Image (cartoon, rainbow, N blue to C red):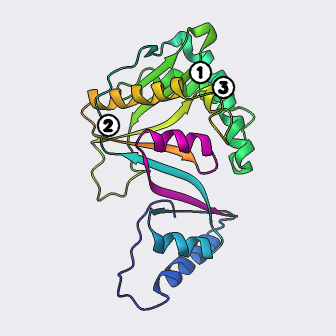
Amino acid sequence: MILPDSFVATDARSGTLDGLLAAAEDALHEAGARINLASYVAGEAWRAAFEADGYEPLTLYLARSDLGDYGMPVGVRQATEADIRGIVERSAENRQVLCDIDPFWKIHPEADPRFSAWMTRSLTLRDRDMMVQGAPENLQGYIIAQPASRLHFPPAHDITGTGVIDDYYHPELANPATLDRGSEASEALLRAAEASFADRGMGAALVVCPAGWTSKVELLKSAGYEIATVWSVKR
């Protein structure tokens, strides 16, 4: 239940929301589901219903609709093929943090070659910008600014003016609890992605962030982002 295709009128009969949730879960279980994932637009009613049913926040989608006019920060550049190895190495650090936060994010044994192949392919895609910091032999961080997809928005909503940031890491974010290494470089990467969106005529950005990655959530909120959608898990 990962798209927010759900609605209950304010004057609906008591128990309507809980009944819909139970029916959806029954359908999933009959289809063989062992883990339930659900999403809801930030708000009290659905949050309370999911939490009461045993769901826990897994992933946050934080949004900002005023990207400002920061321009491209100094020290951030477009990635090249020479950067793929460094991006993959930093991605491995990112994946380990994810797994440490929640074992749901179990690391696939072929994660490195798979990600390397996808990054190589992504360099050929003209609808996104891959940006990095540092020289290829000592890459410090990376961020990918890409267009939104239907995985993030229901069919009735226009996605043409929204960008998404999912692949994003810098060692400043390695401690999921606190920004004890500062945040200047990781914030520069974020502003670079926003500049990329602005150059492409996009006015809003959505950043994917694990709910338990407190330091990253702190960075995003300080940069003007607010929680828009929550993905939850029931194991």
Does the magenta-highlighted stretch encompass residue 226?
yes
For label 3, the SS is helix
- The three-letter code of the residue at mark 2 reads Leu
- The three-letter code of the residue at mark 3 reads Pro
For the residues labelled 3 and 1, the Cα–Cα distance comes to 12 Å
**Residue receiving disc 3:** 113
Near mark 3 (Cα within 10 A), the count class, few <14, some 14-19 or many ≥20, is: few
- The residue most toward the bottom is 13
Could you say which is closer to the camera, residue 108 or residue 12?
12
Residue 117's place in the image compared with 62, above or below, is above
Q: Quadrant of residue 141?
A: top right
Q: Position of residue 233 (x, y in %)?
A: 63, 61
| Tag in front: 3 or 1 | 1
Q: Position of residue 20 (x, y in %)?
A: 49, 80
Earlier-in-chain disc, 3 versus 1: 1
Residue 137's place in the image compared with 106, above or below, is above
| Tag in front: 2 or 1 | 2
* Contact check, label 2 and label 1, Cβ < 8 Å: no
Q: Position of residue 75 (x, y in %)?
A: 46, 13
- The three-letter code of the residue at mark 1 reads Ile
**Residue receiving disc 2:** 67
What span is colored magenta in the figure?
A: 211-233
Q: Position of residue 134 (x, y in %)?
A: 55, 12
Residue 184 shown left or right of residue 96 in the figure: left
For label 1, the SS is helix
Residue 199 shown left or right of residue 40 in the figure: left
Near mark 1 (Cα within 10 A), the count class, few <14, some 14-19 or many ≥20, is: many
For the residues labelled 2 and 1, the Cα–Cα distance comes to 25 Å
Q: Quadrant of residue 53?
A: bottom right
**Residue receiving disc 1:** 87
Does the magenta-highlighted stretch encompass residue 47?
no
Q: Residue visible at 66% across and 71% down?
A: 54
